[in-house]
Amino acid sequence: MTQAVLLPRVETFQAKLVEAHDVTPRVREFVFERLDGAPFTFKSGQWVSLVLPLLDARDRPLRRSYSLASVPGDSSRFELLITRVDDGAASAWLHQAPPGTVLDVKGPQGTFARDLDAGPSLFVATGTGVAPFRGFVHDALKAGRTEPLWVLFGVRTVDDALYLREFEALQQQHAYVRFIPTLSRANDAWAGRTGYVQKHVLELWNELSLHGTPHVYICGVKKMLTEVRELLKTHAGLERHQLHLESYD
Ligand SMILES: Cc1cc2nc3c(=O)[nH]c(=O)nc-3n(C[C@H](O)[C@H](O)[C@H](O)COP(=O)(O)OP(=O)(O)OC[C@H]3O[C@@H](n4cnc5c(N)ncnc54)[C@H](O)[C@@H]3O)c2cc1C
């Protein structure tokens, strides 16, 4: 007999924008707070849907998903990082929303997660896709884990490197945290890696494999996700259970 699987009901609540500021030329950080003051409980890697006072092509309220960028805790506040997309209906509206704006929020949602005992982990992100990895790294450190946690982060320029100082500081403090930014439009002053994440992923995966059976977590646009996955499957024998994906489009 087939058993029905009951998925937990997703909560809808109202949240007020309490703070917003640009963190890179195209990304704005938003701090929302639940209007009812209740703690907002979520797991790193999950996301929320924002319901905007705009209509979509089918005359329904426009909804968009955003990864939670804050580290889980007891707070009624949560942070989102939102890229201003060219001709993007929701992102353009959100980038000009003033503090005090109240929105309906559905969440937390999603199953992109990392078990604390997952072992050596390679996190591959472009742009705001790095948001879930901030939580994954902090969760592991808080739990006293010491497996290698390597963040391969692709952005255009150094000004686009979200959490640059935070990840660099974590790397200094913890030998097993490695932060590897790579710039697709580097200037001459940049001494680090250049090009897309695809250029570096195999080398890092092979090196990480020396520490045990690794897992890869990939977050961002589908084109990058697919290319990284295919590289690892074709050239490094990546197996399904080692692969964790979150697509933004
Ligand atoms: C699970 C999940 C989590 C997400 N988390 C985040 C997040 O943390 N931060 C974030 O900024 N976005 C995130 N997104 C993407 C976000 O939901 C929207 O798709 C994005 O903000 C664009 O919406 P828009 O209405 O502004 O653009 P639209 O009006 O929907 O699209 C306008 C144009 O931009 C293109 N486009 C759409 N999305 C993107 C994109 N991401 N990059 C480049 N071009 C795009 C479209 O193809 C279209 O041509 C996430 C998506 C998913 C599914």
Image (cartoon, rainbow, N blue to C red):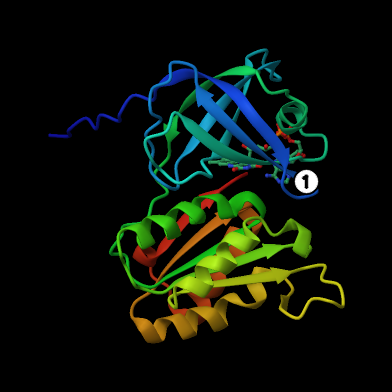
For the residue pair 106 and 28, the one nearer the viewer reads as 28
Q: To which quarter of the image does residue 197 belong?
A: bottom right
Residue sitting farthest toward the left = 1
Give the total number of marks visible in the rendering. 1
Q: Quadrant of residue 214?
A: bottom left
- For the point 74% across and 73% down, the residue is 195
Q: Residue at x 30, y 65 (%)?
A: 144
Q: Position of residue 196 (x, y in %)?
A: 70, 69
Does residue 202 sit above or below 67 in this rendering?
Answer: below
Rendered residue at 65%/18% (across/down): 100
The 10 Å Cα crowd at callout 1, few under 14, some 14 to 19, many 20 or more, is: some
Instruction: Say if 134 sits above or below 82 in the image.
Output: below
Circle 1 sits in a helix, a strand or a loop, which is it? loop
Is 15 drawn above or below residue 123 in the view shown?
A: above
Q: Amino acid at mark 1?
A: Arg
- Whether residue 187 sits left or right of residue 26 in the image: it is right
Looking at the image, in which quadrant does ligand 1 appear? top right
Which residue corresponds to mark 1? 26
- Relative side of 87 to 129, left or right: right
Q: Does residue 185 appear left or right of residue 178 in this picture?
A: right
- Is the N terminus in the top left, top right, bottom left or bottom right quadrant? top left
x and y percentages locating residue 146 in the rendered image = 34, 72
Give whichever of 68, 242 is nearer the camera.
68
Residue 202, image x and y in percent?
55, 79
Q: Considering only vertical position in the picture, is 177 above or below 142?
A: below
Residue at 61 percent of width and 25 percent of height: 17
| Direction from residue 12 to residue 66 in the image, left or right | right
Q: Specify the quadrant that holds the C terminus.
A: top right
Q: Position of residue 87 (x, y in %)?
A: 82, 34
